[in-house]
Amino acid sequence: MKHKRAIPNRSFRVADQIQRDLAMLIRELKDPRIGMVTISAVEVTPDYAHAKVFFSVLVGDAAECEEGLNEAAGFLRNGLFKRLQIHTVPTLHFQFDRTTERAADMNALIQRANATRAKDEGEA
């Protein structure tokens, strides 16, 4: 009996497909807590049992949105079952992605530092 060879980068392809499909499925949700959401990344465990879904929010409260998405996780997983051609569809765990928030904070710090340095150089 031949063993199936592992398909290279399969987990990345599955995660990418989940990310695209979830973006469409989330738009269909009627929950008022879920505003304009962007799925920034999906990390799938090696056994495909769980997927951590990172999202950012353009409009709405991040904590409320995270709560709403996690409550809708079962519904969204069912939607993925219909779309994905894989044996195991992972359990979804939504997590607010603070990367863009931190990037904005860093940009503000850099601008402040540059403004201070320009002022100091102007006084010298």
Image (cartoon, helix red, strand yellow):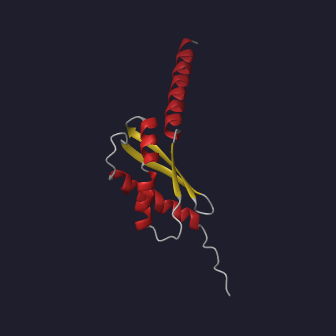
Residue at 62%, 63% in the rendered image? 47
* Farthest-out residue, top: 123
Q: Is residue 58 left or right of residue 55?
A: left
Q: Position of residue 55 (x, y in %)?
A: 47, 46
* Farthest-out residue, bottom: 1
Q: Nearer the viewer, residue 109 or 60?
A: 60
Image quarter (top left, top right, bottom left or bottom right) of the N terminus = bottom right
Residue at 36%, 41% in the rendered image? 35
Q: Is residue 33 left or right of residue 102?
A: left
Image quarter (top left, top right, bottom left or bottom right) of the C terminus = top right
Q: Position of residue 7 (x, y in %)?
A: 60, 73
Residue at 56%, 15% in the rendered image? 120
Q: Is residue 58 above or below residue 92?
A: above
Q: Nearer the viewer, residue 123 or 91?
A: 91
Q: Position of residue 80 (x, y in %)?
A: 43, 62
Residue at 65%, 78% in the rendered image? 5
Q: So how many labels did they put on this image?
A: 0
Q: Position of residue 30 (x, y in %)?
A: 31, 47
The quadrant holding residue 56 is top left
